[in-house]
Image (tube, rainbow, N blue to C red):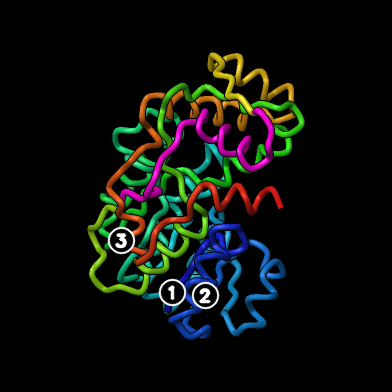
Amino acid sequence: MIVVTGASGQLGRLVIQSLLKTVPAAGIVAAVRQPAAVADLAALGVQVRQADYAQPATLDAAFQGATKVLLISSSALGERVAQHGNVIDAARRAGVALLAYTSLLHADTSPLGLAAEHTATEALLRASGVPHVLLRNGWYTENYLAGLPAVLQHGAVIGSAGEGRIASAARADYADAAAAVLIRDDQAGQVHELAGDTSYTLAEFAAEVGRQTGRAIPYVNLPEADYRGALLGAGLPEPLAQLLADSDMGASKGGLFDDGHRLSALIGRPTTALAAMVEAALR
């Protein structure tokens, strides 16, 4: 039995869709806070169980009979370590054979502030004695595509990444990698540094958007504080603005780059190209 936590989220849904290609629906559990949110998965025969990272009793019930669990990192910044600890403890009590965790690319050496809660979770995993595998995911290309409406409105890409190269990949690529790891039997103790096959600077990202729209789209590099201010001015909440600005600064220091091609090796195909994703987003 494979349990996917956070199954109503964008990544969790994609992981389950990928698993369904090779795993019978009855052998998959979608663990979610609101079961009604995944009625479509239930209709496919996937088991749906209520699970809240902050409520350990729900996790014990959700993990009954589980052999493998995918812990998709919580979106509750500042609360992640405690929530992840609850999941790890529940997995230990359930005696799972493998706990997979979605961490951050090169978390142990990353310059991104986002890495702190991931490294703390990795330490909990090591101390738990639970057999585990780390899926150290790089950036989702969708993180930048989400800003395309603003880019087209203002005619520029802004950020703080400088000349840092970003080896991003599609969320679906990372989901396929998670599914591939979950169906294998040799993953305990593995650390997978996962990133796109190719990389780009934000200037190159801007140039690609310009090429496909027939417009001159420059990249404007800002000091981190100014970029954070621009995000706040656009209506983003402070924690998210801080995270994005810090992540861009981390990218300028190489924090979002990797050329090991481990992701494409796991999924058995090239990662999704930036140009194709920009094209799809502009439709």
x and y, in percent, of residue 157 in the image: 62, 28
Q: Residue at x 50, y 78 (%)?
A: 20
- Does the magenta portion include 195? yes
What is the x, y in percent for residue 129? 25, 58
The percent position of residue 222, horizontal first and vertical second, equals 56, 16
Kindly check if marks 2 and 1 are in contact, taking CB atoms under 8 A apart as contact: yes
Q: Sequence-wise, which precedes: disc 1 or disc 3?
A: 1
Q: Which residues are magenta?
A: 193-216
Q: Residue at x 49, y 71 (%)?
A: 18
Mark toward the start of the polypeptide (2 vs 1): 1
Decide which of 75, 145 is in the foreground and name it. Answer: 145
Pair 2/3: label in front: 3
The residue that label 3 is drawn on is 265
Please tell me the numbered disc located at residue 2. 1
Q: Pick whichever of labels 2 and 3 is earlier in the sequence.
A: 2
Identify the residue under disc 2: 29
Q: Name the one closer to the observer, 81 or 234.
A: 234
Please check the rendered image and state whether residue 276 is part of the magenta-colored stretch, yes or no: no
Q: Secondary structure at mark 3?
A: helix
Q: Amino acid at mark 2?
A: Val
* Mark 1 crowdedness (10 Å alpha carbons): few <14, some 14-19, many ≥20: many
The percent position of residue 39, horizontal first and vertical second, equals: 70, 74
Q: Is residue 8 above or below residue 220?
A: below
Count of numbered badges drawn on the protein: 3
Crowding at mark 2 (Cα within 10 Å: few <14, some 14-19, many 20+):
many
